[in-house]
Image (cartoon, helix red, strand yellow):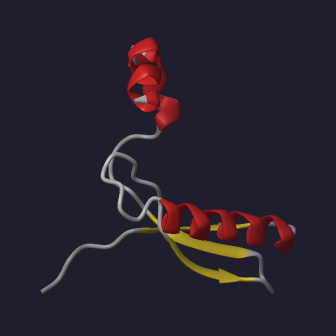
Amino acid sequence: MERPFGYIVKQFRKSKAAKTLYQNLVALDRHLARSTAVRLPRPIAFDEETGLVVMEELPGRDLKHSLPEMDLLEAMRGAGD
């Protein structure tokens, strides 16, 4: 069975920033593993030497681009629930 797979690679000037991002993604993935309400990019790989973080690409639109079309009050209530 095959499934399409997309990923995002981010490279940081400082490997400490890359490591922090990767560790945060790992911690969030563990914490939210059973949740169906929240979907975050899953961590795939980290290279300390080059400062690269590889994470899953999620389908959909970027939140930053969606904000003007959102009812922010309703979205914040939903997130709080």
Which quarter of the figure has residue 23?
bottom right
Instruction: Specify the quadrant that holds the N terminus.
Output: bottom left
* Residue drawn where x is 58% and y is 70% of the image: 26
Residue 56, percent across and down?
Answer: 45, 67
Residue 24, percent across and down?
Answer: 66, 63
Residue 57, percent across and down?
Answer: 43, 62
* Residue drawn where x is 87% and y is 68% of the image: 14
* Residue drawn where x is 47% and y is 60% of the image: 41
**In this rendering, position of residue 67 left or right of residue 51:** left
* Residue drawn where x is 65% and y is 80% of the image: 46
Instruction: Specify the quadrant that holds the C terminus.
Output: top left
Residue 42, percent across and down?
Answer: 47, 67
- Outermost residue to the left: 1
Which quarter of the figure has residue 10?
bottom right
Which quarter of the figure has residue 28?
bottom right
**Residue 59 versus residue 38: which sits nearer the camera?**
38
